[in-house]
């Protein structure tokens, strides 16, 4: 039982690698012509879709209202976020090796802060795509913006947009939970002594 | 006394005449209306948004196409152009598909397509391909069921009227092609009345590659000049054999309706194709000079190529004992149908009072005992009583075709008495009969000619409709009628019009097709020589008087959409690539003044239109397929200058001064 908090800290560090195996977020658009929906997946290092043509199809739909093309090459975060994650994994493993209660907490708080920053960054991108519309847009509705929801469901003209964390996002949640639990269990042990 | 008899007679006669006006008011005999009662509507109702249980592929007859319907609803889903040009889809009009219709006679834009046949694995329909014969210019086509496009057409040499075709073997080792009209062999200028001496019939076996489906005329069997009418291959125990009916064993060449109907019995030719393979391996095949087209559509280049083949292997029965036997069958047999076990071979003598069923095991033992009744051109004739397995007595008039339900029953169509008759295999008793409206030809039970029929529905394919639908002038639609055969008695539940004249049809559970169906062509796999895989690759090139436009389409514009520098007398090739990668987003392309059909380009595909401008001016082109909210804006212009002008070649999209 003594080694459980340390084990949890290892789990917390390694869970972040799930971000490279699964998308962290998904946005799905439903419309009469798309009964099964068009889903875009946001990964730590790339964008993908439910089919190979999805990104092109979303861009085609978006261009009617003058949204910018979503081009993975123009999103720098997809390049440096992976290094932030590698650093957090390395740091987490180091913390587990050092095996100090307070370091568990510091690492977990750092992860929460980074995660919040990441979500805020995601919000800013969504805001930019949704509001920064071309003056040449074939369809222009005064006062209308097309920002998808950060989380949840929202109606945008003829579309319904769903935005939810995906499996990669769940791995981050597991990571935070495990880091926090490691600190809490270790703290309880020391209090009992 | 005499005068009162006369008066009474006259009076009686007058009374009869007077009453006859009431008698004649009784109308048509009852039982011809096919009126329904009960829950038939619910049985065929497929709610909006729901799928049908089966696909039905019905030959389009003289339309040269296949109509694809859903069962039980009878809804028309698609028309597949095969041997006939189709302006709707640009088939046979665009540069890519023109070679599909090439033959040894040149470009033939039409044919008479009779018998669709699904590919099979282990005697069960597998949903990979459907084959169909072209009757007039002897051909067989293969349609790929992942795209519903014609993938290949092969011409059949030494044939006239490819009717007994394509009828597959149990694992689609071969599809067959028997000649309905025997012709001089080799084709030559001879007097028609030298038929018996100069004419021959050929039965061809076309091999089908297991993986690619690619066809090749493996060998032909040279037979006496009869009319080889229909065929079916054996299954189970009889796998390895194919049976062909014949008429005109009288060998007449004129007034056939009389002269070809004289003999009491004609023959079913039983060909042992496994034996034929041995003879080919042993070098018994003669390499005979020939000239026939082989046309293949390549899904990666999106183009067809046509090559001429120059020889064909021919087997001569007198040199190959055991290759072919003749089974005497009464009165000009039409359909020959093999039951799911492979034991019974039903020969429908279309002018006979009874229906003859041969037994495969009896045939084998007759061959073993050499129970023959002479031979024709080296083909032994098996004694009738040694091969017949049973007779269905007086089932109806004019039997044509038989299908099976897999539960021990056979269903035969009768053209003259216009009905479908259900009878039991083995006991040969008739158990039910239902009228058709009118004059049924073929019938179809999904899988009904395979080892594993789905005996739930039966479709009767009628030649004549007369008063069944709203009149449309002298030419009326043909029809299909759907019967529920799940119970003891057949029940008519639906009646719907069909395209062309349907001959044979095939049915298959929808799941076997859905799982293979393609949604679009992957753009990165496009290997068309004139592709433009993005707007950056679009351009216009001049080579002498040829102008090649590398154009793209995407919702909702063409690139380029302004072209200048084209001259009167140029040959302008528009190579249009559809950049879309989404299901159900084709774009069309139509050019004013083009003497051809539109292009209809599927996502990921490239198609080419040839336009030869004849006048100076500025001519519009536009998208014909309502692709998006801005479809009406999907348009462009080509400027045509005089032949001797110096207008520079310029093109562009959204530029003030295109270059």
Image: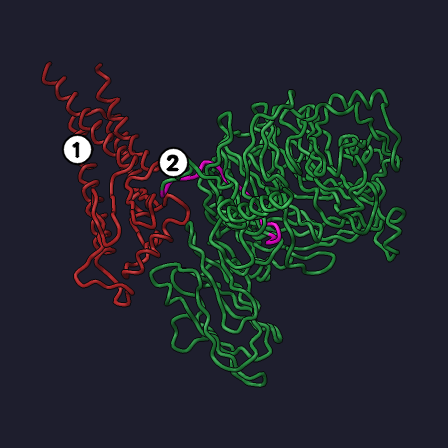
Chain colours: A red, B green
Tell me if mark 1 has few (under 14), some (14-19) or many (20+) residues whose alpha carbon lies within 10 angstroms of its own.
Answer: some
Q: Residue at x 53, y 74 (%)?
A: B593
User: Which quarter of the rendering shows the N terminus of chain B?
Assistant: top right
Q: Is residue A80 left or right of residue A184?
A: right
Range shown magenta: B48-64
**B265 w.r.t. B154: above or below:** above
Q: Residue A172 at what x, y percent from top left?
A: 25, 34
Q: Main secondary structure of the magenta part?
A: loop
Describe the element under mark 1 as helix, strand or loop.
Answer: helix
Q: Tell me what residue is drawn at x 23 percent, y 33 percent.
A: A173
Image point (30%, 30%), residue name: A14
Which is more toward the observer, B646 or B352? B352
Above/below status of A122 relative to B452:
below
Q: Are marks 1 and 2 on the same chain?
A: no
Residue under numbered circle 1: A106
Task: Name the residue located 41 percent from the left edge and 35 percent from the top edge.
Answer: B37
Image disc number at residue B42: 2
Magenta segment includes A41: no
Q: Is residue B581 left or right of residue B192?
A: left
């Amino acid at each position: 039982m003594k080694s459980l908090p340390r084990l949890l800290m290892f789990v917390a560090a390694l869970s972040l690698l799930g971000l490279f195996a699964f998308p962290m977020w998904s946005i799905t658009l439903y419309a009469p012509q798309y009964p099964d929906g068009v889903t875009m997946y946001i990964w730590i290092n790339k964008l993908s879709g439910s089919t190979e043509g999805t990104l092109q199809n979303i861009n085609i739909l978006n261009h009617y209202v003058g949204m910018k093309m979503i081009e993975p090459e123009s999103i720098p975060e997809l390049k440096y976020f992976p290094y932030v994650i590698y650093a957090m994994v390395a740091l987490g493993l180091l913390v587990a090796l050092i095996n100090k209660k307070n370091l568990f907490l510091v690492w977990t708080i750092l992860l929460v802060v980074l995660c919040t920053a990441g979500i805020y960054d995601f919000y800013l991108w969504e805001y930019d795509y949704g509001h920064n519309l071309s003056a040449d847009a074939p369809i222009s509705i005064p006062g209308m913006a097309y920002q998808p929801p950060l989380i949840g469901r929202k109606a945008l003209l003829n579309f319904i947009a769903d935005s939810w964390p995906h499996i990669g996002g769940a791995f981050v949640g597991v990571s935070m939970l495990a880091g926090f639990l490691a600190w809490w269990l270790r703290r309880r042990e020391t209090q009992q002594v | 006394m005499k005068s009162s008899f006369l008066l009474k007679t006259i009076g009686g006669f007058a009374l009869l005449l007077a009453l006859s006006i009431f008698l004649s008011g009784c109308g048509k005999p009852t039982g011809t209306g096919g009126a329904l009662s009960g829950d038939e509507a619910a049985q065929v109702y497929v709610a909006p948004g729901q799928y049908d249980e089966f696909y039905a592929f019905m030959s389009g007859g003289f339309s040269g196409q296949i109509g694809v319907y859903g069962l039980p609803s009878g809804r028309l889903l698609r028309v597949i152009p095969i041997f006939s040009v189709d302006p709707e889809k640009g088939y046979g009009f665009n540069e890519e598909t023109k070679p599909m219709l090439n033959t040894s006679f040149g470009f033939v834009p039409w044919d008479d397509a009779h018998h669709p046949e699904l590919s099979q694995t282990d005697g069960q329909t597998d949903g990979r391909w459907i084959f169909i014969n072209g009757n007039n210019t002897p051909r067989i086509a293969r349609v790929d069921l992942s795209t519903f496009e014609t993938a290949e057409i092969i011409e059949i040499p030494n044939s006239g009227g490819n009717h007994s075709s394509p009828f597959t073997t149990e694992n689609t080792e071969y599809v067959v092609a028997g000649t309905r009209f025997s012709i001089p062999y080799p084709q030559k200028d001879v007097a028609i009345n030298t038929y018996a001496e100069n004419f021959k019939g050929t039965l061809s076996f076309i091999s089908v590659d297991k993986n690619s489906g690619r066809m090749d005329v493996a060998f032909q069997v040279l037979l006496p000049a009869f009319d080889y009418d229909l065929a079916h291959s054996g299954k189970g125990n009889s796998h390895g054999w194919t049976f062909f009916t014949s008429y005109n064993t009288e060998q007449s060449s004129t007034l056939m309706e009389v002269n070809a109907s004289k003999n009491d019995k004609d023959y079913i030719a039983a060909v042992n194709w496994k034996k034929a393979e041995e003879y080919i391996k042993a070098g018994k095949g003669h390499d005979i000079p020939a000239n026939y087209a082989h046309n293949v559509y390549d899904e990666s280049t999106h183009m067809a190529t046509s090559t001429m083949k120059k020889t064909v292997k021919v087997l001569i029965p007198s040199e190959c004992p055991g290759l072919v036997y003749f089974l005497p069958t009464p009165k000009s047999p039409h359909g020959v149908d093999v039951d799911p076990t492979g034991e019974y071979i039903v020969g429908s003598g279309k002018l006979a009072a009874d229906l003859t069923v041969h037994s495969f095991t009896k045939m084998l033992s007759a061959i073993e005992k050499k129970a023959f009744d002479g031979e024709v051109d080296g083909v032994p004739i098996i004694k009738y009583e040694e091969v017949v397995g049973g007779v269905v007595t007086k089932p109806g008039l004019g039997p044509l075709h038989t299908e099976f339900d897999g539960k021990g029953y056979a269903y035969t169509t009768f053209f003259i008495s216009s009905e479908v008759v259900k009878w039991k295999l083995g006991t040969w008793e008739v158990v039910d009969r239902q009228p058709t409206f009118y004059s049924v030809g073929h019938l179809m039970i999904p899988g009904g000619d395979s080892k594993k029929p789905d005996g739930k529905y039966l479709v009767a394919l009628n030649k004549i409709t007369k008063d069944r639908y709203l009149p449309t002038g002298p030419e009326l639609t043909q029809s299909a009628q759907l019967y529920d055969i799940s119970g003891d008695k057949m029940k008519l539940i639906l009646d719907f019009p069909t395209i062309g004249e349907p001959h044979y049809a095939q049915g298959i559970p929808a799941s076997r097709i859905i799982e293979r169906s393609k949604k679009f062509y992957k753009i990165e796999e496009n290997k068309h020589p004139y592709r433009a895989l993005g707007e950056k690759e679009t351009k216009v090139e001049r080579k002498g008087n040829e102008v090649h436009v590398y154009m793209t389409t995407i919702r909702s514009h063409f690139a380029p959409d302004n072209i200048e520098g084209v001259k009167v007398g140029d040959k302008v090739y528009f190579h249009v690539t559809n950049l879309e990668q989404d299901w159900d987003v084709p774009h069309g392309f139509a050019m004013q003044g083009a003497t051809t059909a539109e292009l209809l380009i599927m996502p990921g595909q490239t198609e080419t239109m040839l336009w030869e401008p004849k006048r100076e001016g500025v001519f519009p082109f536009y998208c014909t397929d309502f692709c998006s909210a801005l479809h009406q804006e999907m348009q462009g212009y080509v400027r045509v200058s005089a032949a001797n002008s110096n207008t520079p070649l310029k093109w562009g999209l959204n530029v003030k001064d295109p270059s």
